[in-house]
Amino acid sequence: MESWGESVPLKWILLEQLIENNRKKGKNFVKFNDMVKLAKHREIEISDTDELKLFLRFQGKVGNIIYFEDITNLIILEPQWLVNAFRCLVSDKLDINSLNDKRKPICSHWTELQTTGKISNLLITTLFELKGGDQALEQKEDLIKVMKKFDILVEIEGTDTYIMPSKMPSSNLKTVCKTIGVCTESCERTSWFCLKFEFLPPVFFNHLSAWLIKQYQPFKLTDGSSSLALYKEVCVFDFDNSGCDKLLMTMSTDTIALQVVSFDTNKKDLSDLCSNVRNNLENKIEDIKQRYSLELLYVKDFNAAMHERKMNVLTVKQINDTFADTQPNGDGIFDLLCNVENFKEEEVLPKMQEIAAAFKAMEDCDRGKGLKLVKVLQRPWKVILVSDIK
């Protein structure tokens, strides 16, 4: 923790204790004016608002509270309360039968959230009312502001609807490219700009998606629906209203990749556009790393054939069923995989090395052609392969 060992004023320690006392009494949040009153306690006597804001920023930095200077009516004393409010919106369960007739029309809004990731203001109100209690409902507007800060919600300009990146539907790069016509002769494509991470949290894609939704226009599908080309692992954006130039972003296990495509009949140089996107992306990544105190290492690369590859996630059973007879003994190339659930912690690394060696041998057999081992996930155990699409 960066603040460990730092000297802080005694009155800050006393005010922190007063906040803790309020938290223990079940107080989840206060307004800035309430915090001013707490700071004026006779044993604390912080009357300077600038010093109080400095204290609140420090408390936010170390994770004791959630505080934004431009949201003065909601200083969150109990961060778990915000998590619980978020859970109200991401829950996959809504008992339709429990809704009264007045709330029945909300069913279509619920379906839209589950299928497109769009959530209406009316649905937010209903979910807070049903699942969050009076406090969440009363603080709805400020909770929405806080959720926008954390990229939990992204406002669709000119509407009362939001995108929830965590609820965007699933698709794959090949399907999306086919939908928007990337593989046609009329489409000019750049190479893929790839950022390969040592470790890539899945939520990182949500932060980048939220940022791009604010920067550009999500591509609207031309299938007659109002759906947007926003998915959990691939998104498409228009640079402007013409729709000629588009930006694709996709994610694999350890890589974020972007490509610019153009359907303009007049061929043009896309280098300036690509350069701007690349620079802005790298700046945004540094901003996210700093905001959430993340240590993420990555290398940059250009890949002309990213669209020709796909990720396969295979369970242990699928691996055994597919390659069992390729061992000389004929009784299972991945016997060791069958027992992975029983591995002790100290056995994990050696077993990983055995698995990697087994896959290396498998690559030489007919069914293993073109397969490369990417990662073995622990608990639940799955094997991730990358293969060429023919």
Image (cartoon, grey):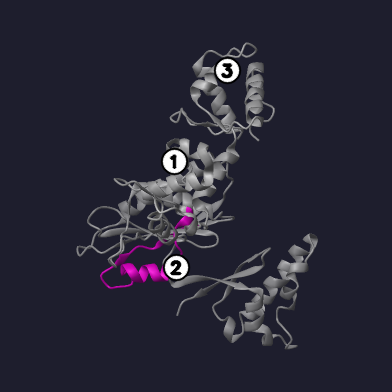
From this viewpoint, which residue is outermost toward the left?
Answer: 266
For residue 264, which numbered disc appears in the image? none
Amino acid type, mark 3: Ala
Query: Secondary structure under badge 1?
Result: helix
Amino acid type, mark 1: Ile
Q: At 64% from the left edge and 83% from the top edge, which residue is drawn?
A: 321
Image coords of residue 75 (percent x, y): 52, 30
Tag count:
3
Q: Which residue is mark 3?
A: 39
Query: Secondary structure under badge 2?
Result: loop
Q: At 38% from the left edge and 67% from the top edge, which residue is drawn?
A: 176
Question: Considering depth in this image, is 209 or 137 the residue closer to the camera?
Answer: 137
Location of residue 245 by image quarter: bottom left
Q: Is residue 298 left or right of residue 4?
A: left
Q: Which residue is mark 1?
A: 144
Residue 246, above or below 182: above
Q: Which contiguous range is marked in magenta?
A: 166-195
Query: Secondary structure under badge 3?
Result: helix
Image coords of residue 9 (percent x, y): 64, 17
Residue 370, above or below 237: below
Alpha carbon of mark 1 to alpha carbon of mark 2: how far?
A: 30 Å
Q: Earlier in the sequence, mark 3 or mark 1?
A: 3
Location of residue 3 by image quarter: top right
Task: Give the crowd class for mark 2: few <14, some 14-19, many >=20 residues within 10 Å.
Answer: some
From this viewpoint, which residue is outermost toward the front?
Answer: 101
Image coords of residue 320 (percent x, y): 67, 80
Q: Is residue 219 left or right of residue 37?
A: left
Q: At 55% from the left edge and 31% from the top edge, which residue is drawn?
A: 29
Q: Which residue is mark 2?
A: 172
Location of residue 55 by image quarter: top right
Q: Nearer the viewer, mark 3 or mark 2?
A: 3
